[in-house]
Image (cartoon, rainbow, N blue to C red):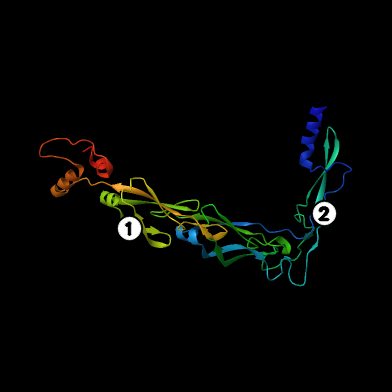
Amino acid sequence: MGGFADLFETFFSGFGGAAAGGGQQRRRSGPRQGDDLRLDLSIDFREAVFGVEKEVQLRHLETCGTCKGLGAKEGSGPTTCGTCSGAGQVRRATRTPFGSFTQVAPCPTCEGSGQVIADPCGTCNGAGLQQVSKTLRINIPAGVDSGSRLRVSSEGNAGPRGGPPGDLYVFLGVKSHPTLRRDGITILSEIPLSYLQAILGDTIEVETVDGPEPLEIPPGTQPATMLTLKNKGVPRLGNPVARGNHQFTIKVQLPTRLSGDERQLLEQLAGHHSSKGQRPPHKSGLFGGLFGKG
Protein backbone atom coordinates (compact mmCIF):
# COMPACT_ATOMS: atom_id res chain seq x y z
CA MET A 1 0.00 0.00 0.00
CA GLY A 2 2.90 2.35 0.74
CA GLY A 3 4.13 2.18 -2.88
CA PHE A 4 0.68 2.91 -4.26
CA ALA A 5 0.27 5.91 -1.93
CA ASP A 6 3.64 7.34 -2.97
CA LEU A 7 2.74 6.95 -6.65
CA PHE A 8 -0.64 8.59 -6.07
CA GLU A 9 0.96 11.58 -4.28
CA THR A 10 3.57 12.03 -7.00
CA PHE A 11 1.00 11.87 -9.76
CA PHE A 12 -1.25 14.51 -8.22
CA SER A 13 1.52 16.92 -7.16
CA GLY A 14 1.41 18.55 -10.60
CA PHE A 15 -2.31 19.25 -10.32
CA GLY A 16 -2.12 21.37 -7.18
CA GLY A 17 -4.26 18.84 -5.34
CA ALA A 18 -7.34 19.65 -7.42
CA ALA A 19 -9.25 16.48 -8.29
CA ALA A 20 -12.59 15.77 -9.90
CA GLY A 21 -15.32 17.10 -7.67
CA GLY A 22 -12.77 19.15 -5.72
CA GLY A 23 -13.15 22.85 -5.05
CA GLN A 24 -11.87 25.40 -7.56
CA GLN A 25 -8.55 27.04 -6.64
CA ARG A 26 -8.92 30.46 -5.08
CA ARG A 27 -7.82 33.42 -7.18
CA ARG A 28 -5.30 35.84 -5.76
CA SER A 29 -7.03 38.93 -4.50
CA GLY A 30 -5.79 42.41 -5.40
CA PRO A 31 -3.21 43.58 -7.95
CA ARG A 32 0.00 41.58 -8.28
CA GLN A 33 3.23 43.09 -6.97
CA GLY A 34 6.00 43.95 -9.43
CA ASP A 35 9.35 42.20 -9.69
CA ASP A 36 12.32 43.00 -7.46
CA LEU A 37 15.44 44.38 -9.17
CA ARG A 38 19.15 43.91 -8.48
CA LEU A 39 21.87 46.57 -8.82
CA ASP A 40 25.60 45.82 -8.41
CA LEU A 41 27.52 48.80 -7.03
CA SER A 42 31.29 49.16 -6.53
CA ILE A 43 32.61 51.47 -3.78
CA ASP A 44 36.06 52.43 -2.48
CA PHE A 45 37.70 50.93 0.62
CA ARG A 46 37.31 54.10 2.69
CA GLU A 47 33.70 54.60 1.54
CA ALA A 48 32.88 51.14 2.89
CA VAL A 49 34.51 52.01 6.22
CA PHE A 50 32.79 55.34 6.85
CA GLY A 51 29.70 55.11 4.65
CA VAL A 52 28.79 57.26 1.67
CA GLU A 53 25.84 58.57 -0.31
CA LYS A 54 25.92 57.37 -3.92
CA GLU A 55 23.97 58.59 -6.92
CA VAL A 56 22.99 55.79 -9.30
CA GLN A 57 21.07 55.54 -12.56
CA LEU A 58 18.23 53.01 -12.68
CA ARG A 59 15.88 51.77 -15.39
CA HIS A 60 12.70 50.16 -14.17
CA LEU A 61 9.01 49.77 -15.00
CA GLU A 62 6.58 52.35 -13.67
CA THR A 63 2.79 52.53 -13.92
CA CYS A 64 1.76 54.24 -17.16
CA GLY A 65 0.82 57.83 -16.42
CA THR A 66 -1.65 58.01 -19.32
CA CYS A 67 -3.90 55.06 -18.45
CA LYS A 68 -2.95 54.84 -14.75
CA GLY A 69 -1.90 51.23 -15.26
CA LEU A 70 -5.20 50.02 -16.70
CA GLY A 71 -3.78 49.54 -20.20
CA ALA A 72 -6.89 50.93 -21.92
CA LYS A 73 -7.41 54.15 -23.82
CA GLU A 74 -9.02 57.06 -22.04
CA GLY A 75 -12.80 56.66 -22.06
CA SER A 76 -12.59 52.89 -22.37
CA GLY A 77 -11.67 50.17 -19.97
CA PRO A 78 -10.92 46.50 -19.57
CA THR A 79 -13.57 44.01 -20.62
CA THR A 80 -14.35 40.58 -19.26
CA CYS A 81 -12.14 37.85 -20.71
CA GLY A 82 -14.12 35.61 -23.02
CA THR A 83 -11.87 32.61 -22.46
CA CYS A 84 -12.35 32.30 -18.70
CA SER A 85 -15.50 34.46 -18.34
CA GLY A 86 -13.69 36.68 -15.88
CA ALA A 87 -12.62 33.86 -13.56
CA GLY A 88 -8.95 34.24 -14.38
CA GLN A 89 -8.61 30.47 -14.45
CA VAL A 90 -9.34 27.66 -16.86
CA ARG A 91 -10.06 24.06 -15.98
CA ARG A 92 -8.88 21.12 -18.01
CA ALA A 93 -10.14 17.57 -17.54
CA THR A 94 -7.53 14.81 -17.69
CA ARG A 95 -8.24 11.09 -17.96
CA THR A 96 -5.87 8.77 -16.10
CA PRO A 97 -5.89 5.07 -15.13
CA PHE A 98 -7.24 6.26 -11.76
CA GLY A 99 -10.19 8.18 -13.24
CA SER A 100 -10.92 11.69 -14.54
CA PHE A 101 -9.34 14.66 -12.81
CA THR A 102 -9.44 18.40 -13.33
CA GLN A 103 -6.39 20.63 -13.53
CA VAL A 104 -6.85 24.34 -12.77
CA ALA A 105 -4.42 26.83 -14.34
CA PRO A 106 -4.24 30.61 -14.95
CA CYS A 107 -6.08 31.72 -18.06
CA PRO A 108 -3.61 32.05 -20.97
CA THR A 109 -5.60 34.88 -22.57
CA CYS A 110 -5.84 37.33 -19.64
CA GLU A 111 -2.92 35.85 -17.65
CA GLY A 112 -5.15 35.34 -14.66
CA SER A 113 -6.57 38.87 -14.43
CA GLY A 114 -10.01 37.96 -15.76
CA GLN A 115 -10.00 41.02 -18.03
CA VAL A 116 -8.67 41.92 -21.48
CA ILE A 117 -7.98 45.25 -23.14
CA ALA A 118 -10.10 45.77 -26.25
CA ASP A 119 -8.83 49.32 -26.99
CA PRO A 120 -5.23 49.52 -25.69
CA CYS A 121 -3.53 52.70 -24.44
CA GLY A 122 -1.32 54.27 -27.12
CA THR A 123 1.40 55.19 -24.64
CA CYS A 124 2.06 51.74 -23.18
CA ASN A 125 0.38 49.59 -25.88
CA GLY A 126 -1.95 48.13 -23.31
CA ALA A 127 0.75 46.94 -20.95
CA GLY A 128 -0.08 49.52 -18.29
CA LEU A 129 3.68 49.91 -17.66
CA GLN A 130 6.44 52.14 -19.02
CA GLN A 131 10.25 51.76 -18.97
CA VAL A 132 11.60 54.78 -17.10
CA SER A 133 15.13 55.97 -16.28
CA LYS A 134 15.61 57.72 -12.96
CA THR A 135 18.34 58.86 -10.61
CA LEU A 136 18.45 57.50 -7.07
CA ARG A 137 20.52 58.61 -4.10
CA ILE A 138 21.47 55.61 -1.97
CA ASN A 139 22.77 55.96 1.58
CA ILE A 140 25.42 53.31 2.28
CA PRO A 141 26.02 52.89 6.03
CA ALA A 142 29.43 52.74 7.67
CA GLY A 143 30.97 49.28 8.08
CA VAL A 144 29.63 47.52 4.97
CA ASP A 145 31.81 45.01 3.13
CA SER A 146 31.84 43.14 -0.16
CA GLY A 147 28.66 41.07 -0.42
CA SER A 148 26.61 43.42 1.76
CA ARG A 149 23.06 43.84 0.45
CA LEU A 150 20.94 46.96 0.80
CA ARG A 151 17.18 47.01 0.23
CA VAL A 152 15.58 50.12 -1.27
CA SER A 153 11.85 49.80 -0.78
CA SER A 154 9.44 50.25 -3.73
CA GLU A 155 12.14 50.99 -6.33
CA GLY A 156 11.70 47.75 -8.27
CA ASN A 157 9.33 47.24 -11.20
CA ALA A 158 5.74 48.38 -10.82
CA GLY A 159 3.13 45.65 -10.74
CA PRO A 160 0.77 45.01 -13.65
CA ARG A 161 -2.60 46.78 -13.73
CA GLY A 162 -1.62 49.27 -11.04
CA GLY A 163 -0.03 46.68 -8.74
CA PRO A 164 2.49 47.83 -6.10
CA PRO A 165 6.18 47.97 -7.07
CA GLY A 166 8.79 45.50 -5.97
CA ASP A 167 12.01 46.43 -4.18
CA LEU A 168 15.51 47.27 -5.37
CA TYR A 169 18.38 45.24 -3.90
CA VAL A 170 21.84 46.83 -4.07
CA PHE A 171 24.76 44.36 -3.85
CA LEU A 172 28.02 46.02 -2.83
CA GLY A 173 31.54 45.25 -3.99
CA VAL A 174 34.43 46.97 -2.16
CA LYS A 175 37.60 47.83 -4.08
CA SER A 176 40.88 46.69 -2.56
CA HIS A 177 43.29 49.20 -0.98
CA PRO A 178 46.99 49.34 -1.98
CA THR A 179 48.28 48.88 1.59
CA LEU A 180 45.33 48.22 3.91
CA ARG A 181 43.31 45.03 4.38
CA ARG A 182 40.19 44.17 6.37
CA ASP A 183 39.47 41.31 8.72
CA GLY A 184 35.95 42.00 9.93
CA ILE A 185 36.17 45.31 11.79
CA THR A 186 39.98 45.10 12.12
CA ILE A 187 42.26 46.82 9.60
CA LEU A 188 45.63 45.19 8.90
CA SER A 189 48.81 46.58 7.33
CA GLU A 190 52.57 46.06 7.37
CA ILE A 191 55.31 48.51 8.43
CA PRO A 192 58.87 48.27 7.05
CA LEU A 193 61.49 49.30 9.63
CA SER A 194 65.26 49.57 9.43
CA TYR A 195 67.16 47.36 11.86
CA LEU A 196 68.29 50.48 13.73
CA GLN A 197 64.68 51.62 14.23
CA ALA A 198 63.80 48.17 15.52
CA ILE A 199 66.82 48.17 17.89
CA LEU A 200 66.67 51.73 19.17
CA GLY A 201 62.94 52.40 18.87
CA ASP A 202 61.32 55.31 17.06
CA THR A 203 58.10 57.25 16.52
CA ILE A 204 56.93 56.99 12.93
CA GLU A 205 53.98 58.20 10.88
CA VAL A 206 51.67 55.43 9.62
CA GLU A 207 48.74 55.38 7.20
CA THR A 208 45.26 54.76 8.61
CA VAL A 209 41.74 55.27 7.26
CA ASP A 210 41.63 58.44 9.39
CA GLY A 211 44.78 59.78 7.75
CA PRO A 212 48.43 59.83 8.99
CA GLU A 213 48.84 58.87 12.65
CA PRO A 214 51.94 58.62 14.92
CA LEU A 215 52.94 55.12 16.04
CA GLU A 216 55.53 54.47 18.74
CA ILE A 217 58.06 51.70 18.01
CA PRO A 218 59.40 50.34 21.32
CA PRO A 219 63.18 49.68 21.54
CA GLY A 220 64.04 46.08 20.76
CA THR A 221 61.00 45.46 18.56
CA GLN A 222 61.28 42.03 16.97
CA PRO A 223 60.35 41.09 13.39
CA ALA A 224 56.69 40.05 12.98
CA THR A 225 55.72 41.97 16.13
CA MET A 226 52.15 43.29 15.95
CA LEU A 227 51.46 46.82 17.18
CA THR A 228 47.94 48.21 17.61
CA LEU A 229 46.23 51.58 17.27
CA LYS A 230 42.92 51.25 19.07
CA ASN A 231 39.66 52.57 17.59
CA LYS A 232 41.25 53.15 14.18
CA GLY A 233 39.54 50.22 12.50
CA VAL A 234 36.13 49.74 10.87
CA PRO A 235 32.91 50.90 12.58
CA ARG A 236 30.61 48.08 13.54
CA LEU A 237 27.72 47.87 11.05
CA GLY A 238 24.62 49.29 12.73
CA ASN A 239 26.68 50.83 15.57
CA PRO A 240 29.17 53.28 14.02
CA VAL A 241 30.32 54.53 17.44
CA ALA A 242 31.96 51.15 18.14
CA ARG A 243 35.11 50.77 16.02
CA GLY A 244 37.67 48.03 15.62
CA ASN A 245 41.45 48.44 15.81
CA HIS A 246 44.24 48.89 13.28
CA GLN A 247 46.98 46.27 13.64
CA PHE A 248 50.46 46.76 12.16
CA THR A 249 52.85 43.89 11.49
CA ILE A 250 56.53 44.86 11.74
CA LYS A 251 58.84 43.93 8.85
CA VAL A 252 62.52 44.55 9.72
CA GLN A 253 64.66 45.35 6.69
CA LEU A 254 68.32 44.29 6.97
CA PRO A 255 70.91 46.06 4.80
CA THR A 256 72.43 44.04 1.96
CA ARG A 257 75.55 46.25 1.75
CA LEU A 258 77.54 48.06 4.43
CA SER A 259 80.21 50.73 4.23
CA GLY A 260 83.51 50.10 5.93
CA ASP A 261 82.67 52.40 8.83
CA GLU A 262 79.26 50.81 9.30
CA ARG A 263 80.71 47.32 9.31
CA GLN A 264 83.45 48.28 11.77
CA LEU A 265 80.92 49.83 14.12
CA LEU A 266 78.63 46.82 13.96
CA GLU A 267 81.51 44.43 14.60
CA GLN A 268 82.49 46.46 17.64
CA LEU A 269 78.94 46.35 18.92
CA ALA A 270 78.79 42.61 18.33
CA GLY A 271 82.06 42.08 20.16
CA HIS A 272 84.06 40.95 17.10
CA HIS A 273 87.89 41.24 17.10
CA SER A 274 88.41 41.08 13.40
CA SER A 275 92.09 42.12 13.64
CA LYS A 276 92.92 38.91 15.53
CA GLY A 277 90.70 36.76 13.33
CA GLN A 278 88.94 35.41 16.42
CA ARG A 279 85.30 34.54 16.55
CA PRO A 280 83.72 36.03 19.65
CA PRO A 281 81.82 33.98 22.18
CA HIS A 282 78.01 34.05 22.02
CA LYS A 283 76.68 37.35 23.28
CA SER A 284 73.56 37.67 25.32
CA GLY A 285 71.18 40.56 25.06
CA LEU A 286 69.86 42.45 22.05
CA PHE A 287 73.10 42.98 20.12
CA GLY A 288 74.32 39.48 20.88
CA GLY A 289 71.09 38.10 19.45
CA LEU A 290 71.48 40.10 16.24
CA PHE A 291 75.24 39.86 15.66
CA GLY A 292 76.55 37.04 17.84
CA LYS A 293 76.32 34.59 14.91
CA GLY A 294 78.28 36.84 12.50
Marks 2 & 1, CB-CB < 8 Å contact:
no
Q: Residues within 10 Å of mark 1 (few under 14, many from 20)?
A: some
Q: Position of residue 121 (x, y in %)?
A: 71, 67
Q: Amino acid at mark 1?
A: Ile
Disc number for residue 204: 1
Q: Amino acid at mark 2?
A: Cys
Foreground of the two, 99 or 257: 257
Picture layout, residue 78 above or below residue 22: below
Foreground of the two, 125 or 139: 139
Relative horizontal placement of residue 173, taking residue 212 as reference (left or right): right
- The residue lying furthest to the left in this view is 275
Q: Quadrant of the C terminus?
A: top left
Picture layout, residue 57 above or below residue 289: below
Q: Position of residue 270 (x, y in %)?
A: 20, 42
- The residue lying furthest to the right in this view is 21
Q: Position of residue 199 (x, y in %)?
A: 28, 49
Q: Position of residue 202 (x, y in %)?
A: 30, 56
Give the residue drawn at x 75%, y 60%.
31
Q: Which residue, given by chain and number where applicable, does mark 2 sit on?
A: 84
Instruction: For mark 1, give the secondary structure.
Output: strand
Disc 2 from disc 1: Cα separation? 80 Å
Give the residue drawn at x 27%, y 44%.
286
Foreground of the two, 186 or 50: 186
Give the residue drawn at x 45%, y 56%.
230
Relative horizontal placement of residue 216, taking residue 156 as reference (left or right): left
